[in-house]
Image (cartoon, helix red, strand yellow):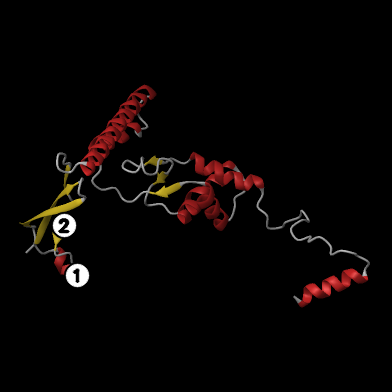
């Protein structure tokens, strides 16, 4: 505050009737300002890399796309973006600026490791990503894959509509969803000798009443033998 008062007194002595306009940020020569070409390189890079639509979250997050779960913003900048700029011979931004653009201007997430995936989806994607196939075969498989996703969406929509009906009239309508969850080795220990011991495998069979939103679990256990004693 004292510095501002001194500046005003100095301007009055110099003959200014009103305080001068703040000149900060208006000189036009910013040594640390990122070039527009460098910023544009981030946008072009992020638009070019392969992305995926979520299989189960398309309805909740229709505009979100995903990258492989083994990537991070740091590894993307270090291993991919830097090489992209060298190859294209364009200036690169700093890692902090790259992260800022990634977060603020793009709706991109990182996929979690896949589990319980759809065998048909996996089969289609293997064929589509096969570089040895001709364009006609890839196009045909892409069409089949899109049709498969449409059918999956219709199934999810049907479950949602029937669930809403069951919630409105639980006496006449019931919607039950059943799912065999992941098999768990029991007990789950981190000590090395436990790796060679026989485990009890737990099968968790889930039953969900969609109308009342109540879940029930049936647990079975089976002891599996290994080649070690």
Residue depicted at x 88% and y 69% = 11
Q: Is residue 161 left or right of residue 1?
A: left
Viewport quadrant of the C terminus: bottom left
Please report contact status of discs 1 and 2: CB closer than 8 Å, yes or no: no
Q: Which residue is mark 2?
A: 184
Residue depicted at x 52% and y 48% = 81
Q: Is residue 67 left or right of residue 120?
A: right
Is 6 drawn above or below residue 123 in the view shown? Answer: below
**Foreground residue, 125 or 135?**
125
**Foreground residue, 195 or 107?**
107
Is 179 drawn above or below residue 194 in the view shown? Answer: above
The label nearer to you, 1 versus 2, is 2
Image-quadrant location for residue 60: top left
**Secondary structure beneath disc 2?**
strand
Report the disc number at residue 90.
Answer: none
- How far apart are the two marked residues, 1 and 2, measured between alpha carbons? 17 Å
Q: Is residue 182 visible?
A: no
Viewport quadrant of the N terminus: bottom right
Task: Give percent across and percent down for residue 8.
Answer: 84, 71
Q: Which residue is mark 1?
A: 191
Q: Is residue 50 visible?
A: yes
Q: Is residue 118 left or right of residue 133?
A: left
Number of numbered labels in the structure image: 2
Task: Give percent across and percent down for residue 227.
Answer: 8, 58
- CA neighbours of label 2 inside 10 A, class few (<14), some (14 to 19), many (20+): some
């Amino acid at each position: 505050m004292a510095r501002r008062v001194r500046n005003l007194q100095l301007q009055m002595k110099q003959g200014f009737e009103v305080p001068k306009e703040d000149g900060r940020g208006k000189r036009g020569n910013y040594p640390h300002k990122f070039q527009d070409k460098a910023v544009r390189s981030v946008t072009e890079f992020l638009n070019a890399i392969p992305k995926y639509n979520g299989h189960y979250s398309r309805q909740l997050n229709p505009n979100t796309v995903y990258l492989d779960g083994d990537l991070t913003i740091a590894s993307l900048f270090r291993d991919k973006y830097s090489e992209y700029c060298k190859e294209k011979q364009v200036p690169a931004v700093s890692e902090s600026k790259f992260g800022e653009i990634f977060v603020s201007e793009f709706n991109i997430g990182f996929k979690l490791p896949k589990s319980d995936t759809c065998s048909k989806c996996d089969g289609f994607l293997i064929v589509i990503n096969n570089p040895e196939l001709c364009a006609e075969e890839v196009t045909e498989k892409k069409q089949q894959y899109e049709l498969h996703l449409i059918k999956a969406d219709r199934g999810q929509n049907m479950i949602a509509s029937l669930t809403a009906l069951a919630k409105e009239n639980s006496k006449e309508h019931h919607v039950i969803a059943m799912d065999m969850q992941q098999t768990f080795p029991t007990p789950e220990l981190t000590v090395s000798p436990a790796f060679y011991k026989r485990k009890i495998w737990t099968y968790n069979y889930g039953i969900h009443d969609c109308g009342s939103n109540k879940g029930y679990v049936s647990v079975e256990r089976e002891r599996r033998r290994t080649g070690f004693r």
